[in-house]
Amino acid sequence: MTLLRDHDLARAFDHASRTYDRLTALNPGYRTDLLRSARRLRLPDDGAGLHVLDLGCGTGASTRALLRAAPRARITAVDASGGMLRQALAEPWPDRVRFLHLSAEELPTAGEGPFDAVFAAYLFRNVTDPDAVLHSVRTLLKPGGRLAVHEYSLGGSPAQRALWTAVCQGFVIPAGTLTGDRALYRHLWHSVLDFDAAPDFTGRLTRAGFADARALPLAGWQTGITHTFVARNGPVPAAAGPARQSFAGTAAAPVPTVEAGR
């Protein structure tokens, strides 16, 4: 199967956006695991005075997790799917949260940042060039800033691949077929099988210049299937310009900033 990318993937998420939260709610531990990963950023003082990027925020479940983990932080949440963002904006948000319709690839030229921390949930296996996106994250992240990636990334054993395939074929794809989104959920199945195993993504982070990269397991049936990857920004790449001081911490068309605080 050819994986969905760029505009095709954004359109698939647009179509699935109305039923997406109902389907993910059937996954035991989905929101609990997001919160656990957000807390692994270990932001001090409930995030007071910090600016956090939620990269690939979808319908806002990851943004809610960040709000609970760092209730005093300022959060900028971005996604390439306008449909997913509309679902996010249907809920009330505090003034310190805003949403932007931007892809991960567009963000470095959008005049946003710098950020004290970046949270990316279910993003990297969906981008065409994960190394380029990691480079962009480093240019947006302050020196020493913290990164947490919450992602399906198999531990590498045949049993984990078999379990993932069984779950997708027995439940995820049939459920997605009923909502008219079979292509998206087949993409989910194959994107996880094709993505880095946990040790490989940890190595990718290190090669991209992140320090102290680690893969942390999550509990429940997704143990060995979903991980939190944590790291901190190393020296700023030359292309990013002068170092900033901080705490020791083909895209969808851009739309004007959408402010949330209703």
Image (cartoon, helix red, strand yellow):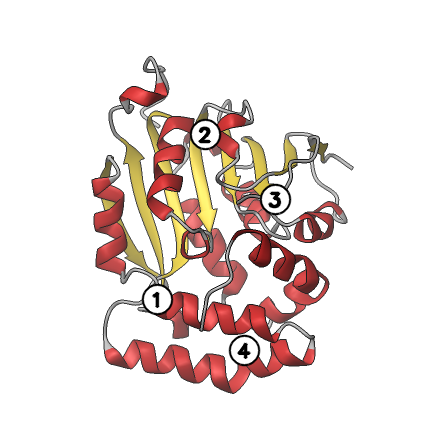
Q: Nearer the viewer, mark 1 or mark 4?
A: 1
Task: Say left or right for 74 vs 247.
Answer: right
The amino acid pointed to by label 4 is Val
To which quarter of the image does residue 258 belong? top right
Residue linked to disc 2:
45
Residue 28 visible from this viewpoint: no
Residue linked to disc 1:
194
| Among numbered discs 1 and 3, the one appearing first in the sequence | 1
Q: Secondary structure at mark 1?
A: helix
Query: What distance separates the C-alpha of mark 4 from that of mark 2?
Result: 39 Å
Residue 50 visible from this viewpoint: yes
Residue 158's place in the image compared with 201, above or below, is: below
Task: Say left or right for 95 vs 219.
Answer: right
| Among numbered discs 3 and 4, the one appearing first in the sequence | 4
Residue linked to disc 3:
252
Q: Nearer the viewer, mark 4 or mark 2?
A: 4
Q: Which mark is residue 172?
A: 4
| Among numbered discs 4 and 2, the one appearing first in the sequence | 2
The amino acid pointed to by label 2 is Asp
Q: Residue furthest top?
A: 242
